[in-house]
Image (cartoon, grey):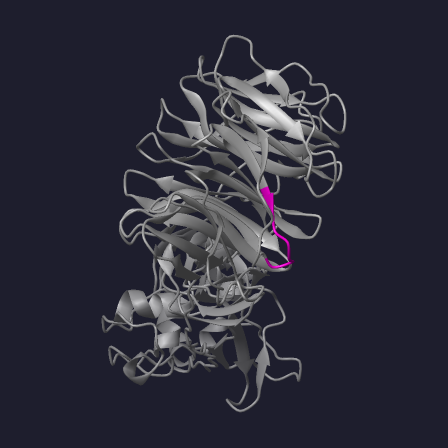
Amino acid sequence: MHLSSFSILPYLWLLRWAVFVALPLACAMPLAAQTIITKTLDSTGSVGSSTSQAVISGNPAISYYDSTNQDLKYVRANDASGTTWGTPVTVDSTGIVGQYSSLAMVSGRASIAYYDFTNGALKYVRATDANGTSWGTPVTVDGAGLDNVGQRPSLVLVGGNPAISYEGSSVLKYVRANNVNGTSWGSPVTVESAGSWCGYPSLAVVNGNPAICYQDTFNEDLRFVRANDSTGTSWGAPLTLDSIGQVGRRLSQAVVNNYPAVSYLDLTNSAIKYVRANNADGTSWGTPMRVDSTGNSSSDTSLAVVNGNPAISYYDPTNQDLKFARANDASGTSWGSPVRVDSTGIVGQDSSLLVVDGKPAISYYDSTNRDLKWATMTLVSTPTVISVSPSSGGVGTSITITGTGFTGATSVTIGGTAATSFNVVNDTTITAVTPAGSVGSASVQVTNPGGTNAANTLFNYIYTIESWRLENFGNAAGTGNRADTADFDSDGIENLLEFAFGTNPTLSSTGELSMSGTFAAAVFGTAGQPILKLEPSANGVDFRSVFMRRADHATVGLNYIPEFSADFTTWTPSSTPPTVLATSGGMQIVSVPYPHFLPNGKKARFNRLRVTLTP
């Protein structure tokens, strides 16, 4: 064919494009918060130190010391959640009694072990009814004025009978009742007395046998000892769990995920620490870990298992607040951020942690007002993010986040930037609209009162038309003169085509693309409008339709469709896939052969490039 009969200009003049656009929808953003409720349960005189909690006949109850009258007191809630509470009861008022109380349910009745300061003795008393409105005659378990024994008792059921560990005039002691009610008691056992003062004992049943965590006060070490039998008649050799610095005060023991564990104070580092055994018997222990740095030395701790994970309530003497920390896992290998439960005045001493109606509840002393207080919390687990759909997009992309713990979410970020909007559909689903972000992977993170999920790479920012609008127009919305079919710079080239061809939509220009070299060795010049180009070939002339194309066109949803026509009415797409001639800065110069004849046998006289966008 003799090409001189063809004119290139008509083909360039007849280039036209079609535009198809879809836009994301915005979402609303509800918010929720964690609930902490505090109550003053007794404010008559100076009351509320030496607290101990237990569930008595289904409802939470507290034993505590009335320092004004120097009596032992008890109060129980009227319901399982602790919404309302009954009238406090004085349990023992003979002498100075009630310090270091320890409350437990014994054979269906509330029972308390406590210190009789007047007689330097360990005492025990059991209620005569299920709710603890009336009480029996206290029993002196050890001491009776002969020795100063019975401080810091820890009351637990051992083999069905009540048992108590306690400080016994510089030694560690243990005693168990002869019956299920505790009306008579066996002979006290000295568990350790080897040249040291043993303090802060905490008793628990560990793999069937009683075990005690305590402080070797002389060496200021944390220690553990377990009985050789199920009733505690003989005891094994003590183990030192932590001896680095001054450690082991204000401790609390519990069985955590089947193994014994203990919370305690590290006086040297002013820290709350936690350590757990490596086996069920407690013959081997893990490495102690720091839960919080309180900045002072008198933090009481109380350890319990809350919703499957260990948790600690404690006093922060630096800020004079009550705090709570819960582990992120069932064994306590890592811990969440501490929660400030009460910060009104000087509060939080002598705390006791208990699970009440599925929620953590803490009894404690309000030193400012000299009252007994109680707090309960609604915990929110740290969110997890499992997947994001779609997993890629640009600014303004509507995404669905799937995971857990989304109820009460307070923020959603993508790549560290707050989502334009988000909606908590339910506990496992959030919908959100992405903000502007840098091209590449981005972490999708949800925050609720329980914390923030771990970083991830679940979303990938691509350079969408919304990103392009934001960069060039300062707004991602495709409305007004920013619409894809609009012409922002009035140069006759619609906005979508400026995006597709890599040209500046704010600078009026209709210039063509430029390239040098041959089709086989093209060199990228400048972005611009499509051209027709020919060059000699072995068979005569190589004639092509040449146009700009984004390298990421498939990802962003751009389709470039070269078409040919004989009559400017019926258009036929090119039957040959485009060939990439050159690439630069995310743009490609591509070409398709210009056919001499169309499938219907007619000459191809006209050429156009149709561009569509499918987000």
Magenta segment, principal secondary structure? loop
Residue drawn at point x = 39 percent, y = 75 percent: 496
User: Residue 76: x and y, percent?
Assistant: 53, 58
Residue 184: image x %, image y %? 69, 35
**Residue 20 in view in this figure:** yes
Identify the residue at image location x=25%, y=81%.
490
How many badges with numbers are in the image? Answer: 0
Residue 290, given in percent of the width and then of the height, sits at 45, 31
Q: Position of residue 364 (x, y in %)?
A: 41, 48
Q: Nearer the viewer, residue 232 or 307?
A: 232
Magenta stretch: includes residue 574: no
Give the side of residue 255 with respect to residue 48, left or right: right
Q: Give the position of the N terminus as an image quadrant.
A: bottom right
| Between 189 and 95, the one nearer to me in the picture | 95
The answer to whether residue 520 shows anywhere in this view is no
For residue 298, which quarter of the picture? top left
Name the residue: 42% across, 45% down: 71
Res 204 → quadrant: top right
Q: Camera-side residue: 505 or 474?
A: 474
Q: Is residue 605 above or below residue 136?
A: below
Left or right of residue 126: residue 459: left
Q: Is residue 333 above or below residue 42?
A: above
Residue 294 higher or lower than 35, as above or below: above
Front-most of residues 335 and 385:
335
Side of 597 where 414 appears, left or right:
left
**Magenta span includes 127:** yes
Q: Which residues are magenta?
A: 125-131
